[in-house]
Image (cartoon, rainbow, N blue to C red):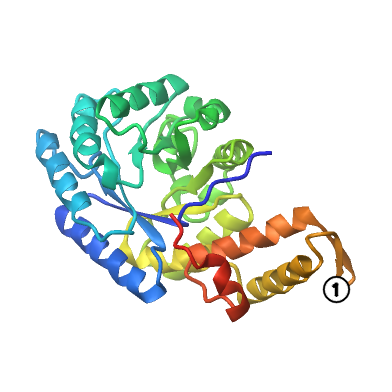
């Protein structure tokens, strides 16, 4: 049985130098606040590099990645595998900073063959251990989501909403890219469910697309909550610093869920993990796994755990 991997619930993207530096500063400050790294920073070569300046931008990304605070998680999005700068990006970024990176994001992946090409480039750069995350942005890519999720080098799949909509040649209206339409248009809903299901089938992390209405934090948190509760996503992109905390809040379990999980797991532990009756309901190892995952999610989102549960997470995670 596959079990979805554990990553921070928020992945924050930035590509302009000033914003990349501010993102790393915010990550360091929030790590101090929560006592753990609660979101990833992904430095962006694809959208961040000016045309003709790809080499220089990759070198800047390496400099920033090598200078981040130890224990924090920093990844890089390179250009697509069919872009002229792809090989150069990977050789520079993975070759010089691979040991310091949490992941490499490969955009516009269309097939398993694209994953294989990316893996070969990363291996050639000497960063065989570097996890790959991929971004699916077309109907054909979504059709192959299960095969892509099955690839052993893929750690997480993200959904590229805006490119997915535009790939339909006007057949999907523009409002399907908005905060409401993306949860109601049937083709977009189907794509999200395919990606989430493929990831859960193969123990990978499904990552939800951006919400462009970054000034409306209440709407963002509502959308993030729907992505988590209704669509099965366990991670979400951020494109503005104001989005990080709402994403954390939306993906975090409630205080009541945390209290229930701790209480039930303590009772199960006392029973030697045998089935128990808890508040009039049968609970067994299946539900124990679920409630343990609640606590893992609480830990990843910086929630305060009851005293009796803190020892369970005494060692820092990922």
Residue at 23% in and 41% down? 45
Residue 172 appearing in the image = yes
17 over 123 or under it: above or below: below
Q: Where residue 201 sits: x, y (%)? A: 63, 37
Residue in the foreground of this view, choosing between 282 and 215: 282
Q: Residue furthest top?
A: 113
Relative to 128, 220 lies left or right:
right
Q: Where residue 268 sits: x, y (%)? A: 77, 66
Residue at 42% in and 29% down? 169
Residue in the foreground of this view, choosing between 219 and 134: 134
Circle 1 crowding by C-alpha within 10 Å: few under 14, some 14–19, many from 20:
few
Q: Residue furthest bottom?
A: 307
Residue at 40% in and 72% down? 35
Residue at 63% in and 72% down? 258
Q: Which residue is mark 1?
A: 279
Relative to 85, 159 lies left or right:
right
Q: Where residue 41 sits: x, y (%)? A: 32, 54
Quadrant of the frame with the C terminus: bottom left
Relative to 34, 27 lies left or right:
left
């Amino acid at each position: 049985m596959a079990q979805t991997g554990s990553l921070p619930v928020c992945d924050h993207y930035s590509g302009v130098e000033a914003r990349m530096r501010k993102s790393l500063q915010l990550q360091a400050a929030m790590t101090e606040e929560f006592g753990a790294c609660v979101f990833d920073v992904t430095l962006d070569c694809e959208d961040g590099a000016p045309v003709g300046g790809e080499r220089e931008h990759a070198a800047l990304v390496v400099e920033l990645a090598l200078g981040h605070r130890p224990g924090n998680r920093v990844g890089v999005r390179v250009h697509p595998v069919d872009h002229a700068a792809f090989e150069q990006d990977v050789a520079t970024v993975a070759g010089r900073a691979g040991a310091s990176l949490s992941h490499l994001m490969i955009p516009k992946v269309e097939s398993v063959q694209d994953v294989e090409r990316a893996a070969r480039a990363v291996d050639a750069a000497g960063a065989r251990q570097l996890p790959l995350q991929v971004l699916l942005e077309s109907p054909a890519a979504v059709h192959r989501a299960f095969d892509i999720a099955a690839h052993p080098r893929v750690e997480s799949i993200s959904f590229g909403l805006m490119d997915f909509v535009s790939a339909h040649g006007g057949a999907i209206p523009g409002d399907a890219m908005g905060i409401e339409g993306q949860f109601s248009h049937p083709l977009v809903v189907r794509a999200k469910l395919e990606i989430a299901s493929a990831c859960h089938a193969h123990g990978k992390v499904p990552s939800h697309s951006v919400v462009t209405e970054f000034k409306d934090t209440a709407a963002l948190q509502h959308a993030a909550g729907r992505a988590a509760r209704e669509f099965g996503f366990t991670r979400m992109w951020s494109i503005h610093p104001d989005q990080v905390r709402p994403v954390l809040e939306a993906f975090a379990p409630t205080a009541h869920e945390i209290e229930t999980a701790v209480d039930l797991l303590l009772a199960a532990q006392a029973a030697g993990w045998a089935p128990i009756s808890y508040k009039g309901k049968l609970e067994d190892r299946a539900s124990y796994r679920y409630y343990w995952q609640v606590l893992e999610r609480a830990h990843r989102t910086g929630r305060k755990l009851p005293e009796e549960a803190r020892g369970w997470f005494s060692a820092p995670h990922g």
